[in-house]
Amino acid sequence: MLAIKHLSKQFKSGDHIVKAVKNISFDIPQGIFSTIIGKSGSGKSTLLALFGALDKPDSGSIEVDGRDITKMNDQKLIHYRCKEIGFIFQNYNLVPNLTALENVMLPMEFAGIATDVRKKRAQKLLNEVGITKDKQLRRPSRLSGGEQQRVAIARALANSPKLILADEPTGNLDQATGKIIIDLLKTLAKTENTTIVAVTHDAEISKKADMSFHLQDGKLLKN
């Protein structure tokens, strides 16, 4: 489903050239929860930005469901970001003046889905991630960190994306809550038949993944 071939990316930092990603190749099948583990500066965030079409590689290809996103024009990339990919952030990034339900409905509104359809889909997803009916009507400030991350996960699933990218999804959670979130992501990869790629520095998270990749200084190490 996700096929990475000879991917490289470098950028300028002051007077230096930083080779953030160095000739990386790997494949991740559909319905798999995978992790990319590495220390700060290993290239994890750059790799995630490339997968999300937020940046372009210097060389190599990124195939999502058989299509190379590095060759897409701007219009196709907008469609890709809107409908074919979901993002989960460390800081949740929920809209503070919207309820949990409205936050999950928002991506579907941008995708032009009818109000009744997106409400029903949002309610289903929130139930699936464990947000009860009363909490669905609360704003993020009235939810715990773990609950906010559950809402963020439901939002990422809203448009039934083929690929979900998670950036340190347990970084702001305590260990017990983080474990619950990782178990949830692993389950959702199967039930929603979507590929989830989480970048993390936590080796314990990678142990729970169906597949795990280790980055060091922009290079992929064998596990």
Image (cartoon, rainbow, N blue to C red):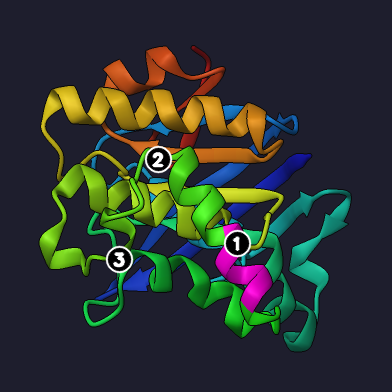
The quarter of the displayed image where residue 119 is located: bottom right
Q: Is residue 69 above or below residue 221?
A: below
Q: Residue at x 76, y 64 (%)?
A: 69
Q: Which type of secondary structure does the marked residue at label 3 adopt?
A: helix
Query: Residue 157: image x %, image y %?
Result: 57, 53
Q: Residue at x 71, y 44 (%)?
A: 6
Q: Which type of secondary structure does the marked residue at label 1 adopt?
A: helix
Q: Is residue 7 above or below residue 190?
A: below
Q: What's drawn in magenta, residue-wise? A: 116-121
Query: Residue 146: image x %, image y %?
Result: 21, 42
The quarter of the displayed image where residue 26 is located: top right
- The residue tagged 1 is 120
Q: Amino acid at mark 3?
A: Leu
- The residue tagged 2 is 199
- The residue tagged 3 is 137
N-term-proximal mark, 3 vs 1: 1
Q: Nearer the viewer, residue 59 or 200?
A: 200
Q: Which type of secondary structure does the marked residue at label 2 adopt?
A: strand
C-alpha span from label 2 to label 3? 30 Å
Residue 120 left/right relative to 183: right
C-alpha span from label 3 to label 1? 14 Å
Q: Residue at x 49, y 77 (%)?
A: 106
Query: Residue 120: image x %, image y %?
Result: 60, 62
C-alpha span from label 1 to label 2? 31 Å
Name the mark nearer the viewer: 1 or 2: 1
Q: Residues within 10 Å of mark 3 (few under 14, many from 20)?
A: some
Q: Residue furthest front?
A: 134
